[in-house]
Amino acid sequence: MAERWQCRPSVFILVFAVTGGTFAGAKTFSESTTWLDPKLWLLGIGMGLLFDLAIYFVMQANRLGPASASWTVLNLGLLVPIFVSPFIVDEAVLWLDPIIVILFVLMLLMFARGMKDAGEVEIGNQKLHTLMLLGIFFAQGLFLLGNKIKFILFNETNTAVLTFIVYLSGATAVLFVMFTSQQRPTFQGSELKAGAITGICNSLGVILLLNGMSLPSTIVFSLSASIALLGGVFLTSLMYGERLNRMKTLGVMVGLMALILAVFREKLASILGSI
């Protein structure tokens, strides 16, 4: 939506962070919150800066190469918490888990190939583009890992307040960059609308994701990302008339397989293990 309406990235991010933070701030009154815990603020500020960095690296990568590359690497960032979580949390790893991850990666690669077939090409410095893609992977991956660390530190509490601090930190960082670069924050109607819609939806999504951290990382990250990606494909096809080519259709089918395996992971492992 922001791309179609030609929103300026810094203004769009600012509106979306402020809106998301306001939504999360209102939610804090309905749950247990420890506002003065320094660990909470340290984690929230760190995640907020990673959030901004991930968006910055995505914008830079999109200027240097195809959007399919940055889009794929952004979603592959979930491999960081999936691989790190078993070492910091007592999570059981089933033999189906690698299959779920492989199917998810295949789905991303198929979508990326389908987007490339639409005519996207690399137009910038290849080494710099690679560095930006690495930045996307680690910024997004560490941001997602922060969700798991939150569960370790606070369990079911401090969900909305952490989201509030993340957006507050992100918005503050954007304002700092704007003022140091002497960029005056002016707002257009399209930027306000796109930022507000994105902020509400994204804030709700982060809160729901944080509430799902009691599930194994292989399930919660693969399941949430697969649902979001598949939903995004269908919505863009419906709203903007983007057709599903062969590779995108295959990606949808593989994604559905990953979803089914993730939902019935424990039951399938038990049934197949007893055969």
Image: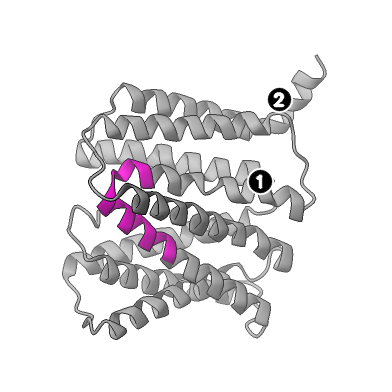
Residue 54 belongs to magenta span: yes
* Residue bearing the label numbered 2: 268
Residue 250 image offset from top left, x and y in percent:
40, 23
Alpha carbon of mark 1 to alpha carbon of mark 2: how far? 22 Å
- Does the magenta segment cover residue 208? no
In this rendering, position of residue 24 left or right of residue 192: right
Magenta span = 53-70
User: Which circle marks residue 261 in the picture?
Assistant: none
- Specify few, some or many for label 1: CA neighbours under 10 Å numbering under 14, 14-19, or 20 or more: few
Tell me where residue 58 appears, x and y as whole percent.
Answer: 36, 55
Question: 273 left or right of 117?
Answer: right
Provide the residue designation for mark 1. Answer: 83
User: Is residue 106 depicted above or below 135 in this figure?
Assistant: above
Q: For residue 273, which quarter of the picture?
A: top right
Depth check: give the residue in front, 251 or 230: 251
Q: What residue type is labelled 2?
A: Leu
**Total number of numbered discs in the rendering:** 2
Residue under the point 55% across and 47% down: 78
Mark 1 residue type: Phe
